[in-house]
Amino acid sequence: MDEPETNGPEQDEPTMAAVSRAILLVMAAGVVAWAIVTALGILVFALG
């Protein structure tokens, strides 16, 4: 991220990169939320 990307006219469409990054963020957030819910469910099941 620190190095500047100067690839010339190829960088005319940053939308694809932004969309892919947003999709990755949403997927990561979903995985984290699923892991938290699963851990809570296991804890409740084990304690209850």
Image (cartoon, grey):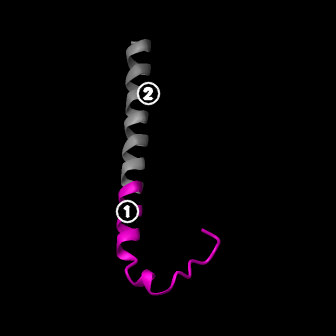
Task: Tell me if 8 is positioned left or right of 13 in this view.
Answer: right
Give how far across and how far down residue 43 sits, in percent.
44, 20
Numbered range of the magenta stretch: 1-24
> Which quadrant of the structure image shows residue 20?
bottom left
- Amino acid at the residue labelled 1: Ser
Query: Could you tell which of marks 2 and 1 lies nearer the N-terminus?
Result: 1
Disc 2 residue crowd, few under 14, some 14–19, many 20+, Cα 10 Å: few
Q: Which mark is residue 7?
A: none
> Secondary structure under badge 1?
helix
Q: Quadrant of the N terminus?
A: bottom right
> Which quadrant of the structure image shows residue 26?
bottom left
Q: Residue 1 or 25: which is nearer the viewer?
A: 1
Q: Is residue 16 above or below residue 44?
A: below
Q: Is residue 46 magenta?
A: no
Q: Which residue is mark 2?
A: 39
Give how far across and how far down residue 42 sits, in percent.
41, 20
Residue at point 35% right, 75% down?
15
